[in-house]
Amino acid sequence: MPIKEQPKSPRFRIIANILLAVSGLFLLLNLFLPGLFASGPTGVPYSLFIHQVQEGEVSRVSVGQNQIIYQLKTENAEPPQVFATTPIFDLELPKLLEQKGVEFAATPPPKNTWFTTLLSWVIPPLIFIGIWQFFLARGAGGGPQGALSIGKSKAKVYVEGESAKITFADVAGVEEAKTELVEIVDFLKTPARFTQIGARIPKGVLLVGPPGTGKTLLAKAVAGEAGVPFFSISGSEFVELFVGVGSSRVRDLFEQAKKQAPCIVFIDELDAIGKSRSSNGFYGGNDEREQTLNQLLTEMDGFAAGDATVIVLAATNRPESLDSALLRPGRFDRQVLVDRPDLSGREAILKIHAQKVKLGDDVDLRAIATRTPGFAGADLANLVNEAALLAARNMRERVAQEDFAEAIERVVAGLEKKSRVMNETEKKIVAYHEVGHAMVGALTTGNGRVEKISIIPRGMAALGYTLQLPTEDRFLMNEEELRGQIATLLGGRSAEEVVFNSITTGASNDLQRATDLAERMVTAYGMSKVLGPLAYQQGQQSMFLGNGGGNPRRAVSEDTSKAIDNEVKEIVETAHEQALEILRQNRDLLEAIATQLLETEVIEGEKLHSLLGQIKPLAKTTADSVAS
Ligand code: ADP
Ligand code: MG
Ligand code: ZN
């Protein structure tokens, strides 16, 4: 397959193009040569030629494939006149010539010298090579692949030195991800530094995040920064019509990659092949996908440390659906979150894309960023383009702020169908809700440290989120910690109650989780004094019952069932009271943090810790009621 002979440097491509040009020129010359040589004799119609033969005026004829050249009889010693005509397929001609006693021969045309013969042998291969190189060069630039690659890996190769080299400077708003990937660049640039002290270079890095947040862009930037070839293929391209094509494509892809190492293999939409094998349920597996996945696992295990440095980057927006075998050490053991950008991130992304258009003086990118919460990088790129189109339609020379305003409306209208974009009131409710989680979480045990609060919509389910990182690995939890977790889950709804004195639908997932947890405390962990240390829950969930309806209980009497319900309710109610109490006693802080959050959309790290550190612990009485 030609891609492995892919020239590394653009110099080769220039030579290829010169070859193409030269062979084209020869081809043209070759076409016109006969014309050039034929300009000697005077052209006459065939009918005239036949007439002259019949009249006996012709002395000699040379019959060629495309041309008949003949001389007329000359009475005096003048130089003979030469004429040419285009022959018609005429079997009678030799007979006629013989009759008239004309001297004739089927000579090859005089232009056919050794030189032209040579050319006709040399030019076609040259042209072929030229075209081949041309398509390769286009393929390398990300253009359509030639038909030469059927059945082989369809990976597009971006080679170092491409004119449009992407670097980290082209990506904004995803600082954490960038920091992580800088390390990958180091691995690729100086692998020796790591292998020398025996460190294993990571093989696989999984970029996780919603669509349009710049995962593909980041992968290209890694290749651009490291100056290595970049093989890009989409997971869905592996899984095609024919069984076995997928796995052979994987094999081929890695074969090529190893030859070009160090390099990056980028697999977009990894979930298309990497879906959990167990999730196929009763319907049997998708054999083709499974084979492809297995081949991928084999290949990733295949190249050992010290081998060629091939780093596999992959992107997905559904990490939870991936087969766990893919996430094991030695495969995609690193996961990098590429989340939707916050306010300042959006401003930075707008700045990058605004460079490509002419901006008016009144354009305020910060203001635009403020109005576009929930926009991913691709949406912002689209926004800038949309604004430029509007400006052009309005016959403006430069993009004005009002173009952006109109463009936002258009893009939002489009996005509202796909995902959610919150209005101001919703944003406010979500802010208080999330701060509620964070504050209760900070004051109760059993939760990890609250690391981040965000009101940037994320994924399909949540409008905002509060990120808690466990301080240590926990395998055992005591009752107080579980109660703390339940209170934290109810913190969001409680904040809505405290501040707005009303409840929205936003907390339903929280309530579900809190109730499940409370139920497990009672039915599985034996934490209820009333019911005692009995397991009321059936050991294994049956595969046939599905998992929609909570935990199946063992057969219990009606009284017990009632008692379980009461206990669960009691636990949740107590936690709810606790959460409400915490928030009421820290009402001012709740306001302060929520206001701050509405402004910046994300609060994290030190800033968050110092804010949450100001929470006043609960008065004695409530703490007692919790412990009981
Ligand atoms: P993903 O692969 O995550 O779905 P892409 O990387 O394909 O998203 O992003 C599509 C386009 O959106 C990019 O080519 C770029 O123009 C723009 N874009 C997305 N994220 C960013 C970002 N963080 N910074 C700058 N531009 C971005
Ligand atoms: Mg992508
Ligand atoms: Zn919540």
Image (cartoon, rainbow, N blue to C red):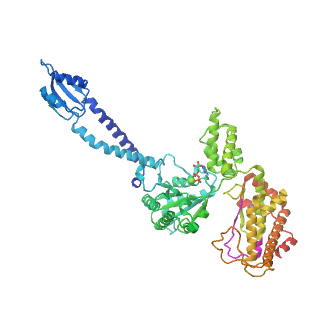
Residue 149: x %, y % from top left: 42, 53
Q: Quadrant of ligand 3?
A: bottom right
Quadrant (top left/top right/bottom left/bottom right) for the C terminus: bottom right
Residue 478: x %, y % from top left: 74, 76
Residue 54: x %, y % from top left: 17, 23
For the record, the magenta segment spans 465-483
Is 566 left, or right, of 467 in this rendering? Answer: right
Q: Nearer the viewer, residue 601 or 458?
A: 458
Q: Residue furthest top?
A: 76
Q: Which quadrant of the view contains residue 538?
A: bottom right
Quick check: 224 above or below 532?
above
Q: Residue furthest right?
A: 621
Q: How many numbered markers are drawn?
A: 0
Quick check: 160 above or below 102?
below
Q: Is residue 272 magenta?
A: no
Asked whether residue 434 is in view, the answer is no
Q: Which quadrant of the view contains residue 88?
A: top left
Q: Nearer the viewer, residue 163 or 537?
A: 537
